[in-house]
Image (cartoon, rainbow, N blue to C red):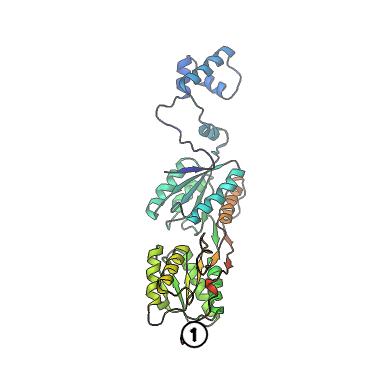
């Protein structure tokens, strides 16, 4: 179910909630008279207005501000945010950045977790049914053409982390390729030529971009890309650990590891500890995480400001809501290499 951030969500239309019709019937007057009292308009005698207000109190009537807002300005002050999953550091930071801008604009954020590509359409449709003013989507699926009617109705849609498919919309992305190029180049400068890569499914946009950046760095130094040093499809730290154990136990193991997300980095740390190689095999991980500087050696990472990604996406959306209508485009935010120790381990002389 969607949950509200930065405000109190209202679903409206609950069974048993008294309506203006109920108040009018209780008083013996017209719905128009009740509406006039609600909106502070003239045309109702003081005595009737008093009876209407008393009836509202007795019946527990509450004005539906959402419906009222729609009548007056066609705005609900609600932003929809669809995430593949909630509770990860990435998604928590993203929500924080979006909510910061939404609060400044007097809006709140209604979040919903789509979970899978199959559920994404259902989730986005549910958000749209709540008449959100705009949508920010971290995509799980591959086709978002079904959102075109929402755009045509004036609802701006901004995608985050992955570009949209089947729809022309703004996207706010990380420079995954450049970050991966910088991380790989850093390992190459330490003398490493056999660099193992562990990551999630290459069909994921960010993974494909990071693999591309890794290969670009190798080409620059005229180092051949070795398929046998790549393990993709690791969906969690446990799977990444086993992938690293497999790589490090091979006949020609890598002297360094480049991990494509923080779960893979955690898995790699566990594998290196199990094999006693934490000071012999270098590692750079894509994505920072809270305990990266507490590990021995501290983990060198490629970091990106996820809160700023959220703020940028929210600003784009509010600009479109305000009437700015340039052609949809991509906004790409930079990454930063944070050298902490694990990525600065030089190639170990095997004869030592």
Local secondary structure at mark 1: loop
Which residue occupies 55% across, 63% down?
303
Q: Residue 138 at what x, y percent from top left? A: 48, 54
Total marks placed: 1
Residue 322 coordinates in the image, percent (x, y): 62, 45
- Relative to 76, residue 19 above or below: above
Work out which quarter of the rendered image holds the N terminus and state it.
Answer: top left
Q: Which residue is mark 1?
A: 349
Residue at left offset 47%, top offset 79%: 255
Q: Nearer the viewer, residue 59 or 276?
A: 276
Residue 102 horizontal/vertical position (percent): 58, 45
Q: Judge from the rendering whether residue 243 lies leftward or rightward of residue 178; answer left or right.
A: left
Task: Report whether residue 158 is seen.
Answer: no
Q: Nearest the camera: 167 or 182?
A: 182
Q: Position of residue 221 (x, y in %)?
A: 55, 81
Q: Does residue 241 appear in this view?
A: yes
Of 321 and 107, the residue lying toward us: 107
Residue sticking out furthest to the top: 47
- Bin the neighbour count of mark 1 within 10 Å (Cα to Cα): few under 14, some 14-19, many 20 and up: few
The image shows residue 243, relative to residue 27, as above or below, that is below
**Which residue lies at the image location 50% right of the left edge and 30% below the top edge?**
64
Above or below, comparing residue 305 to residue 150 in the picture? below
């Amino acid at each position: 179910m969607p949950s509200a951030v930065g405000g109190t969500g209202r679903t409206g239309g609950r069974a048993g909630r008294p309506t203006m019709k109920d108040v009018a019937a209780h008083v013996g007057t017209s719905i128009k008279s009740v509406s006039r009292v609600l909106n502070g308009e003239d045309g109702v005698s003081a005595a009737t207005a008093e009876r209407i207000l008393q009836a509202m109190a007795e019946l527990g009537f509450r004005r539906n501000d959402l419906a009222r807002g729609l009548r007056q300005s066609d705005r609900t002050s609600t932003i929809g945010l669809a995430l593949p999953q909630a509770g990860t550091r990435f998604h928590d930071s993203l929500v924080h950045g979006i909510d910061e801008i939404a609060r400044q604009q007097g809006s709140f954020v209604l979040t919903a977790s789509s979970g899978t590509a199959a559920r994404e359409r259902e989730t986005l449709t549910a958000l749209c049914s709540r008449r959100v003013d705009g949508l920010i989507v971290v995509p799980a699926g591959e086709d978002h053409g079904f959102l075109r009617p929402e755009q045509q109705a004036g609802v701006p849609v901004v995608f985050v982390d992955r570009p949209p498919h089947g729809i022309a919309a703004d996207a706010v992305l990380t420079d995954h390729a450049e970050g991966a190029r910088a991380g790989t180049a850093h390992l190459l400068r330490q003398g490493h030529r056999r660099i193992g890569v562990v990551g999630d499914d290459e069909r994921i946009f960010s993974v494909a971009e990071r693999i591309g950046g890794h290969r670009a760095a190798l080409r620059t130094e005229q180092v051949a890309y070795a398929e046998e040093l790549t393990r993709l499809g690791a969906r969690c730290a446990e799977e990444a650990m086993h992938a690293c154990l497999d790589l490090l136990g091979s006949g020609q193991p890598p002297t360094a590891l480049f991990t494509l997300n923080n779960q893979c980095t955690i898995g790699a740390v566990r594998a290196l500890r199990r094999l006693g190689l934490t000071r012999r095999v270098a590692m750079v991980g894509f994505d920072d995480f809270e305990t990266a500087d507490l590990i021995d050696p501290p983990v060198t990472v490629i970091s990106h400001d996820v809160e700023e990604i959220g703020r940028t996406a929210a600003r784009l959306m509010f600009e479109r809501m305000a009437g700015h209508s340039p052609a949809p485009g991509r906004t790409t935010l930079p990454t930063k290499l944070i050298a902490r120790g694990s990525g600065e381990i030089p190639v170990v002389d095997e004869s030592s």
